[in-house]
Amino acid sequence: MRFVRLVAFGQTSIILVLYFKSIGITETLVGIFMSLTLFGDVFLSFVLTLYADRLGRRNVLTGGALMMTLSGIVFVLSNNFYVLLIAAIIGVISPSGGEIGPFRAVEESCLAQLVSLESRADVYAWSTVLGGLGGAIGSISGGYLIRLLQDQYSFSPVESYKGIYVFYSVCGALKLLFTVLLTKNVELHPDDKKAQDAVVAAKAVDNRAPNVGSAETDALLQGSGQPAQNAAPVKSQGLLSRLMPHLSHESKKIVFLLSCLFAVDALGSSMTNSSWTSYYISRKFGISESFLGSIFFTTGLVSCVGSLLGSSISKRLGPLITMVVTHLPSSILQMFVPYPNTVHGALLIMIIRASTCTMDVAPRQTFLSSVVLKSERTAVMGWVNVVKTLAQMIGPTFTGHLTGMDMQWLCFVIGGALKVLYDLGILSTFLNVKLDRDHN
């Protein structure tokens, strides 16, 4: 399912900005479109992942496949900015070529349900490889499909771009078929669901308890003979606490810190997503869509190999160290993408960067799924995706504004610096955190 979805995302990402420019939408509005798409995706992701285990994981994935199919049809039939925005939100059309929406979190939770901790890194690595391969195939096939439609069938640029969204709907239909074939074992086990409900109930009781002070305050009041009811009521829970998924106390602290760090990384990535990068390379060097597709196909294949190596390194160094030592070089290289004056120089930096930029994906998924309880995984992974998406909302608008000022190169420098900050922050914060808390 992920392979098919990333094929579709890979095709649409290389032409998204070019498509909007061809129908008269400015770079600034394109950035706003991307940000609003991500904003709508936040709500969708938060609701569906929070209740995925109760609604049924297969039901959530089925609904996602249907929405994906319908959104592609809308992009074919309409040129209206607002109609396309609604379709992109509901159908989860990725403005970056990467994973957005709640469905990756649900799929990763399904994988964690089916495999042991020891095998999880390998499974996540192969999932990442298949996703990266799908994105690479989507990039090159999308570029050459556009060239074929324009050269052989005399399609206009707009018509050829719409052809990509026809294929997007086909991918949605294929994903629907694969979802129907999923085993029922991907669903949360009834015993684990009871444990999850117990955490929810306990939190609800805590929320309703009137005038409950801290342990130290209670002791002082009892010692002084002052009635407990005269104690000052505790402030109600903050908005962030109410919005976060129902977690154990230890998990809540871990997830909060991880959310802050992942948000910094996501912001850095969103400033140079594949849609904006392809537009930058196309405008700077004047290359065609087919050549763009070849570039992202090459970097995608290199990333796939890197993903497998990341899993192997993780077994030796552990997931956290692997996350940092593999991701940090790519973060630094991102800052140097704008400097070459030839397309081959830029391509060389992009290929070297691609060799390490996804090595951290499988270890990161393993790390995240291991520092929380298994009854919390789906909600936590969904919450993390929501936080990352919220952070990504800022980047495209900022990039669109700088692009309109002919300063898009600056986005690579700022984005790379933010990702370096994330790498150093997560290493210093979580170096001593225990894994597999269900057994510790």
Image (spheres, rainbow, N blue to C red):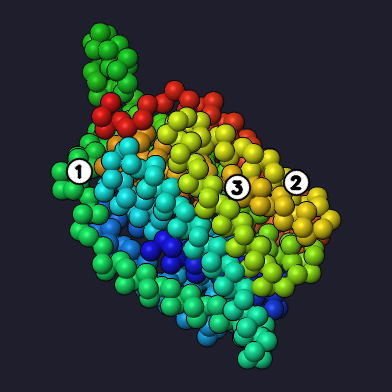
Residue farthest to the right, as pictured? 341
Going from the N terminus, do you reach mark 1 or mark 3 first?
1
Going from the N terminus, do you reach mark 1 or mark 2 first?
1
Residue drawn at 32 percent across, 21 percent down: 214
Residue drawn at 42 percent across, 34 percent down: 315
Q: Is residue 309 left or right of residue 144?
A: left
Q: Which residue is mark 2?
A: 336
Going from the N terminus, do you reach mark 2 or mark 3 first?
2
Write down the quadrant of residue 186 in the picture: bottom left
How packed mark 2 is, by other alpha carbons closer than 10 Å (few <14, some 14-19, many 20 or more), is some
Contact, mark 1 vs mark 3 (Cβ under 8 Å): no
Q: Amino acid at mark 2?
A: Phe
Identify the secondary structure beneath mark 1.
helix
Residue in the foreground of this view, choosing between 367 and 141: 141
Nearer mark to the viewer, of 1 and 2: 2
Residue 54 image point, x, y percent: 24, 55
Residue 30 shows in the view = no
How packed mark 1 is, by other alpha carbons closer than 10 Å (few <14, some 14-19, many 20 or more), is some
Residue 26 image point, x, y percent: 72, 71
Q: Which residue is mark 3?
A: 355
Identify the secondary structure beneath mark 2.
loop
Q: Is residue 423 left or right of residue 105?
A: right
Q: Amino acid at mark 1?
A: Asp
Q: Which residue is mark 1?
A: 192
Q: Is residue 113 left or right of residue 365?
A: left
Q: Which mark is residue 32?
A: none
